[in-house]
Amino acid sequence: TDGCGKAAAARRIDAAKLDPWSNEDPSVRELLREAFDDTDVLHYDLEIEIDPNHQTIDGVNTITVRSLVPGLTEFTFRLRDNFTITSATINGGTPVTITNVSTTTRTATLDRAYDPNETFDLTIAYNGVAVSRGFGSIEFTTQNGLPLISTLSEPYYAYTWWPCKDGDVGDAGDNADKATIDIAIIAPNSLRSVSNGVLAGVDHLSGGRDRYRWSTNYPIATYLVCFSSSVYNTWTVNYDYGSGTMPVEFNIFPADDTSGNRAAWEKCVTMLGTLAGVYGEYPFVNEKYGMYQFGFGGGMEHQTNTGQGGFWEDVTAHELGHQWWGDDVTCRTWHDIWLNEGFATYTVALWREFKPGSSGIDQAHAYMATRVPSSMNDSVYVYDTSSIGRIFSSNFSYKKASWVLHQLRHVIGDTAFFDTLAAYRAAFSGSAATTDDFAAIASSVAGQDLTWFFNEWVYGIGAPTYEYGWQTENIGGQDYLRLSVSQVQTAGYGVYQMPIDVKVTTAGGDETIVIWNDDWSEHYVLPISAAATAVVLDPDDWILTEGKTDVGYVAGPPAIVQASPAPGESFGFLASPTAMTITFSEDVAAASEDFDVTGATTGPAAFTLSYDSGSYTATLDFGGALPADQYTVTVSDSLVSAGASIALDGELADGQDPNSLPSGEGQPGGSAVMQFHVATWCDGDVNGDGGVDLTDLAIVLANFDTASGATRVDGDIDGDGDVDLADLAILLANYDSVCP
């Protein structure tokens, strides 16, 4: 399954060319309406009576609204025009005028202008024959010959059964205006009615009717409000969360009430504890979690009470994951549906990884291998929210979206990833968030700008396809891996930048090196512990790709692998180098004009070049010790490989850090620039190694009180011909200093 079954249902709707929305003209939807964020709904008090025989709803809803702007004179709500509004009053009795704006939408003209923070209660009474839309927004059907009336409002369908503030059909919407709700369902007393929150009571009414009263004090998005009325067998299991217990309520069709099905659903209790360890405690722990059976062939994450059509473990985990990601933190718009469905899909991977008895991360990898999209040619972000099939795309809103999280986890590391989830929940609990909101938190927690990642994997299309090849060679006593990596995906996808794990197998075992890949074709020279016998790119499949193929090594640019003096190396005056050696990753055509050595004060240093093609080493002979100075060595990218004449890849991340070798950024071109230092022979530096330290003190003490004829290397620092207290005083005054 796709996790919850909505993707499959959306595909069926699209294939049948059914219009899930309405016949209104989108160009007039928002005319003459107040802005969505002009008001804040605080509470709904909804009572509905359902008639299974006539498929009617008779309801009344009191909406408590706070004005957020000066002079608010109208309030727009959604209720389909198949319902007749029998009365509309404000603040307990004053009639108000209701105008039908469209098939889905009504506007109430308020009794006066309301200013910021003023509130009003709008009461709407209505009745009519229900008309279902989408996935089954209000379905009057049967189960095993018994009545079954259920709702599934996502994304915009709440208007088909109750009046509420909501985004319009086909639009991006805004799920940020959550409210608490009391919901009462009146139905024949042979039926049990379940809904969100806790059961406040059951009233036995005349005419063989029961009223089930449910209430939640947790703010809830409109599309997550639900009810289901049918003949149910009910049982409860307690979830122990340490400081207390919470009821987990199950409602199952009698015909499906088997020990196996009960055990399958009761796995959610273990899941609650496991996911609490991953995400933090269950968001609605002060009320309940529930599962009820309904007619939809998948699942729907109604807040505190999941509707589910079967007994699949993965669907149970997916829907439970939604309680954190979708219910507590809700996608603000339908552009951002991946924040619901991608997170819930990845919850299944995390459940498999962390559940009791799991072997760990390999189980998450195994699950993600089953979530590879069959097509990569669209974005995770939903640009067209008018298409139900696109909103609930299996490939993009579920599968590829879950890979966004899987890849992000590897890019920033486990600690930062789970800290990001915690920070995201802390910032938006009880509210709604956008993709940019999540990206900003991830960047902040990880300590790096992740705009590139979200641009590629959420807002962009496609996925990379890699071809690679490798060679291994010992150069100067060190084994190296030459690696070529090319991206060969559809050009329209663009280039992907990603860190890639490279597993290198040697006689001593496996080692993993991480490379940064950000161009169509790149080459790497990597030091390894021994000769490579096998190389695998992204061995654990952390990256979503359309293929990774070893096609053999493709010749690339030479790089500098060793240098002596090394970048950043310092020498005492007496140890000043008389030559420099530079070793390349392969045979090069070296010429004197490719090299330059210049002192900061002494200027260019003359040298004689020799080159050994067997060791790939160029030697610059200075003809004697270099004078004290700071030297900059430049190897120009005019230097090319001997065979293919490919220009040097010479850039160093830091010309004074020996760990910057091997050189290169993966592409031909780019000169190498590195520095080394020859210190002066400063006061107290007896042995000329560039610093005044314990070795110098030992020499002075060993030769202390030497008769005339002593030299500087004997400890005669002041040059008076002997080693005495004056020399010792100079040394101690400069002790632990470095010669300039």
Image: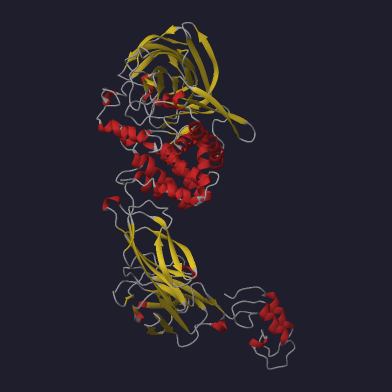
Image color mode: secondary structure
Position of the C terminus, as image quadrant, is bottom right
Viewer-side residue, 419 vs 291? 291
Horizontal side of 196 relative to 137 (left or right) equals right
User: Which residue is drawn at the image coordinates 57% and 84% (left, top)?
Assistant: 574
In the image: residue 583, left or right of residue 493: right
Q: Is residue 496 visible?
A: yes
Q: Position of residue 721 (x, y in %)?
A: 68, 90
| Residue 407: image location, x then y, percent | 43, 50
Q: Is residue 315 toward the left or the right of residue 287 in the image?
A: left
Residue 40 spot, x, y in % from top left: 46, 23
User: Is 329 drawn above or below residue 229 in the view shown?
Assistant: below
Observer-nearest residue: 547 or 693? 547
Instruction: Please name the residue shown 66% across and 75% down the image.
Output: 734
- Residue at 64% of width from left, 79% of height from top? 683
Q: Is residue 11 above or below residue 579?
A: above
How many numbered discs, if any?
A: 0
Viewer-nearest residue: 346 or 93: 346
User: Residue 303: x and y, percent?
Assistant: 48, 28
Q: Residue shown at 40%/62% (left/top)?
A: 536
Q: Please state, as top left, top right, bottom left or bottom right, where the N terminus lies in the image.
A: top left
